[in-house]
Image (cartoon, rainbow, N blue to C red):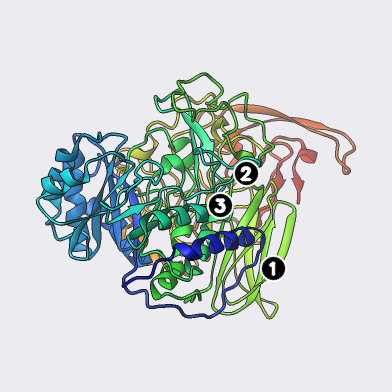
Amino acid sequence: MRCSFASHLLAVAGLLAALGSAAPFSHSVVQRQDGSDRLVFCHFMMGIVPNRKSSSDYDTDMQLAKAAGIDAFALNIGTDPYTNDQLTYAYESAAKNNMKVFISFDFNWFATGDAGKVGSLIQEFGSKPGQLKVDGKVFVSSFTGDGLSIEAVRAASGTEIYFAPNFHPEQTADASSLDGALNWIAWDSDGANKAPKPGQNLTVGEGDAKYATWLGNKGYIAPVSPWFNTHYGPEVSYSKNWVFPGDLLWYNRWNEIINMESAPRFLEIITWNDYGESHYIGPLSSKHTDDGNSKWVNDMPHNGWLDMAKPFIKAYKAGSKDVEVEEDQLVYWYRPTLKTLDCDATDTTMEDAPNPQGNYFKGRPDGVDSMEDAVFVVALLKEEGKVTVTSGTNTKTFDAPKGASAHKIDMGVGAQRFSLTRGGKTVMSESSLRDVMDTCPCGIYNYNAFVGTVPAGPADALGADGLTNLKSGLKVATCEPTASLPIGTGAGSQPTNAPVPAETDASSSPSPKPTSDSSPKLNTTMPVSSAPTPPPPTPALSSLLSATAESAPPSSSIVSTMQSSASPPATSEPQTTTITVPADEETGGECTATVTASKQIRPTNCLSSGQLWRGGGDPPACCDGVKTCCREQ
């Protein structure tokens, strides 16, 4: 019999607040009760995968999740005509990959009067081999749905069900008819579905305590999520624009979970593939269609968050406060721009849009004041070491203990570099594939996170189907529906074995440049090359992603012009730009030059006027004829 954990959660809520301002945080070795009955779920959006053609299209998702310790996908479904086909594929894939799934009914689309329809779907899929069962019962959940007749659902299903919906204590006062419940609110808020305000901060831990009190000894599904950012403008009918505080949430929340004296029986990670709200931990290459989110998702992989979760999931299931690390790894993340960057002139949300739920704000997303301008690093180490982070002109070295610890540094425009040393010797180091920029990516406010790892992992890019609406509503012409990494002057070259996304027909159209937070990169002291030797693979994901990747030709290394974060590659008819560089100490005067895009690609090494050369090998060429405009750094 499981113990109630309500009495412990308010104390843990205070612990989270302390964790938010205390970095590094290390773990002591303290064992707790056996956690053998604990399960980890991950929310999977079925509404964006109508382009999947068979169960094999789900296999990589199943394999990656299982390798990280995730037990089941919560398959979020609406009432789309393709729902049953996609459920069939997902259930078949789960069965052949020794994974489990269950249906999560989304009551944005189902009505609370649809108990018969809900029960019928449970009856159709509940007996399949891939179905998760808890206590011998078919496990079922939902997104919202308060007011649904649970008795009618049970009767229509024709089977015993373990019903743990996303009902709310404020709307369903009596939880006696439930077997458990999911708390969706994984982010600190103002209590009204927006970021905290002064004097209004409902923490995730306080939400835990409310659900625990309401449910008693019933099964609580506690939420865990890394981020929240959404930025849909009037180009779609579901305009919304806000953020919740992210920063070190992913690290702090996992610590909160494993430090509970009596942890919840279930966890649900939010989410695997909700790209529109930026809290995906699955790969960009997971096959899906584009509902307009590619504007802030392209070139923004999150695979490192899945890597980071693996040892915490293991600790949670073991009932341990100690995070055991098998291989050294640094996981880092940051936004692509500072909060001070003004994108009002070109942002897609500066126009009026329908706002029936109060979720649409013009310009910067609502809640940005709750986020820090910082680069965050979680060190997962087999033994203590020193972690050095460089963000633009800011550099800081941290003493990192054995196990898991979190660190942060003020974010600076420019290259982002990370290294681990022990005894004065470099163990590993990487330069991120994405600089922090002082220009607006695709012209918009992008508050998504770029996540990378050291050592680097395999490349990961949106496929063609995931890029179809990237240009819809954009006010700039510099952004194209293709992967664009590396972005900036600090990034290394692309790997020679980068995968071609599944929905891209490589025989009929050029392959997009491979994109990854964790593609092999070169130190800035090495020559830029189109065929570097890949570093050792990231432990958690490399074998699975590499096994499913197809080979693509090596792409030329691009030297960024710093004009745009998503400049298209040079063509046979390059565009001409003129740049004036202010006076500097060397020349005492300014210089003006006209350059073309084609001159920015090796082997010429030509740079736009004023470009700072950060590469190695051959020095920069001054093809524009104005030598003082090519300054070497």
Task: Compare residues 629 and 270 and report the one nearer the observer.
Answer: 270
Between marks 2 and 1 in the image, the one whose residue lies nearer the viewer: 2
Instruction: State the mark number for residue 370.
Output: 2
Q: Amino acid at mark 2?
A: Ser
Q: Looking at the image, which residue is at 80% across and 40% down?
A: 628
The answer to whether residue 628 is left or right of residue 265 is: right
72 relative position to 230: left or right:
left
Q: Which badge, 3 or 2, comes first in the chain's sequence? A: 2
Between residues 552 and 318, which one lies in front from this camera angle? 318
Please state the horizontal and vertical placement of residue 523, each as a whole percent of the image.
62, 61
Q: CA distance from mark 2 to mark 1?
A: 25 Å
The answer to which of marks 2 and 1 sits earlier in the sequence is 2
Where 340 sits versus 98, above or below?
Answer: above
Q: Nearer the viewer, residue 153 or 238?
A: 153
Q: Is residue 570 visible?
A: no
The residue at which mark 1 appears reads as 398
Q: Where does label 3 land, which residue?
A: 433
Q: Quadrant of residue 236?
A: top left
Instruction: Name which residue lies at 18% across and 60% down.
Output: 137
